[in-house]
Structures are given as structure tokens and as C-alpha cells.
Image (tube, rainbow, N blue to C red):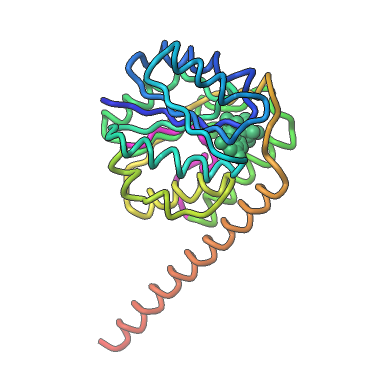
Amino acid sequence: MLTAVVLPTYNESENIARLLHLLREVLPEGFFLVVDDNSPDGTGVIAEQCALEFGNIEVLHRASKQGLGSAYRQGFAVALDRGVDVVVSMDVDFSHDPRVIPAMLASIVAGSDAVVGSRYVEGGGTKDWPLHRRLLSKWGNLYTAAILGVAVRDCTSGFRAYRATALTAIAPETTAAEGYAFLTELVVRLSRKGLVISEVPIMFADREKGTSKMSGRIIAESMLLVTRWGILHRLGQFRKMLKSVLHRRKS
Ligand SMILES: Nc1nc2c(ncn2[C@@H]2O[C@H](COP(=O)(O)OP(=O)(O)O)[C@@H](O)[C@H]2O)c(=O)[nH]1
Ligand SMILES: [Mg+2]
């Protein structure tokens, strides 16, 4: 099974080489695609050196910081173009443990269209995350699942594996969100298409090196979009219900 791992980076010079090394151990045949937004700390250059050293690695150099959603949109398009069977997405800061990937791939082989590395299923959790991030993530996910009516417990986890056909079917290139909302939108699309989404537990560790790029703007974007999608979804349900009642009255 040909597997691509898409790795968005912005200022990950202290993490990228170690992660690519570990990934190569876990997936000796895997294709790794680094999507670097011209990191001022030289992440892109280090990634190029790793490509020479470890092989089967490509680095997309983008002109400037354009956000996680945009990096994934471009990275997914390149990975799918390569004709791989599975596309994995993950953070580069060791919050996501590459050693979980084989379990995700096994779940795809067993029939899942997408697998989410989940903090909020039995056996999963967060380690060393500050309280405000824990609360924001946990409550944000409860709100998201409730308002959107999706049965996925961790809609904002960036650690995932997608069957290539499923990823193509949900057309990630037609999304517009910049931050976590991008991840939520993909889950919603998978769910609405009736594709099989499973979750494997992960222990999410806070980054030890480098700094988070999460911002108030990204949180606001996520809350706004999730609320908008939720209202549209509920309105759609209401309209359907009304139609069926009127139809029953007539007949
Ligand atoms: N290419 C690219 N990668 C980004 C951008 N913002 C974040 N990332 C990467 O996305 C991953 C998750 O970002 P991070 O700052 O750790 O977010 P957090 O885990 O929510 O605090 C990391 O690998 C980052 O380097 C961006 O604008 N462009
Ligand atoms: Mg992180």
C-alpha cells in the first residue's frame, strides 16, 4: 500500500530532521512531503538535506506563511497526483507519535475510509498541555460534534490517514478555511458522504521544541465557521422535516 505523509512546517528546525528520521524507520517505503512556508529558521533547507540523506522525500517551498489549511490543500493535491493509496497528515512537533501510523493503516486495510488519531476516545488524551488549551480543545470538540451532528469525537485532530479515493471524493481543494476549521470541514464532508470514519486513540503530547502557531484569529475562524455550518445543517434538517410533513398532509 503506497503511503504518503504530508508534513506542514513553519519554523520546525528543531524537529524536522528527527521526525523524518523516525518516520523513515516506521515507514521504510513511505513518501514524505514537507510543505514549508519559507520558514525563517531554515526548516526548508534542513528538510532538503534530509531528502538527500533518507530518500523518497520531497519539499514544497512556498513563498510565505499561508496557514495550515492552505499547506494541506497543496500537499494533498501533490500526494494524490503521485497515485498513492493512502495519505497521512500529521504535525511535525512530535505532538503526534509516528509509531501510531501502522495502526491507522491497519484500520484502512480493515475497511475504514479515514482514520482519526483521537484524543477523546477511550485510551486517548493530552499530555503536558496547558489547561486553557485542554479546555478549548475538549469543549470545542463537544460543541462541534453536537452542532454539526457528526459522530467523530476529535474533529480538530490533524493526525489522520485517508484512503486516497475518499480524500479525492471530498475535494479538499474546494475548502477555504485557514486553521483547524479546515480539519473539521474534511470530517464533515466524509461524514455527509457516508464514508467510514474510525478513530484510534492517541496520547497528544505538547511540543517540547519550537512554538505553537495557533492564534486567536484561527480559533475565531473555527468557531465562526463551525457555527455557520451547524446552523445551515440544522436548517436543512428542518426544511426536510417540514417537506415530509406537508407531503403527508397532502396525501
Ligand atoms: N506550512 C505551514 N505549516 C504550518 C503553518 N502553521 C502551522 N504549521 C505547521 O502545522 C503543524 C501544527 O502547528 P502548531 O503550531 O504545532 O499548532 P498547535 O499544535 O495547534 O499548537 C506544525 O507542524 C506547524 O509547523 C503554516 O502557516 N504553514
Ligand atoms: Mg503543535
Tell whether position 155 is magenta. yes
Does residue 14 appear to the left or right of 7 in the view shown?
Answer: right
Locate residue 250: give its quadrant.
bottom left
Does residue 214 appear to the left or right of 229 in the view shown?
Answer: right
Residue visible at 36% across and 38% down in the picture: 114
Residue 62 visible in this rendered orientation of the protein: yes
Does residue 205 appear to the left or right of 20 in the view shown?
Answer: right
Residue in the foreground of this view, choosing between 123 and 194: 194
Residue visible at 44% across and 46% down in the picture: 187
Q: Residue furthest bottom?
A: 250
* Residue 162 horizontal/vertical position (percent): 36, 37
- If the image is split into quadrants, where does the N terminus sit? top left
Look at the picture and state if 21 lies above or below 36: above
Residue in the foreground of this view, choosing between 93 and 8: 8
Look at the picture and state if 199 lies above or below 221: above
Q: What residue range appears in magenta?
A: 149-163
Residue visible at 26% across and 28% down in the picture: 109
Decide whether the magenta segment is chiefly helix, strand or loop: loop
Locate residue 164: give its quadrant.
top left
* Residue 33 horizontal/vertical position (percent): 44, 29
Locate residue 129: give its quadrant.
top right
Q: Quadrant of ligand 2?
A: top right
Tell whether position 192 is magenta. no
- If the image is split into quadrants, where does the C terminus sit? bottom left
Residue in the foreground of this view, choosing between 244 and 92: 92
Look at the picture and state if 19 lies above or below 109: above
Residue 117 visible in this rendered orientation of the protein: no
Residue visible at 31% across and 39% down in the picture: 81
Does residue 127 appear to the left or right of 73 in the view shown?
Answer: right
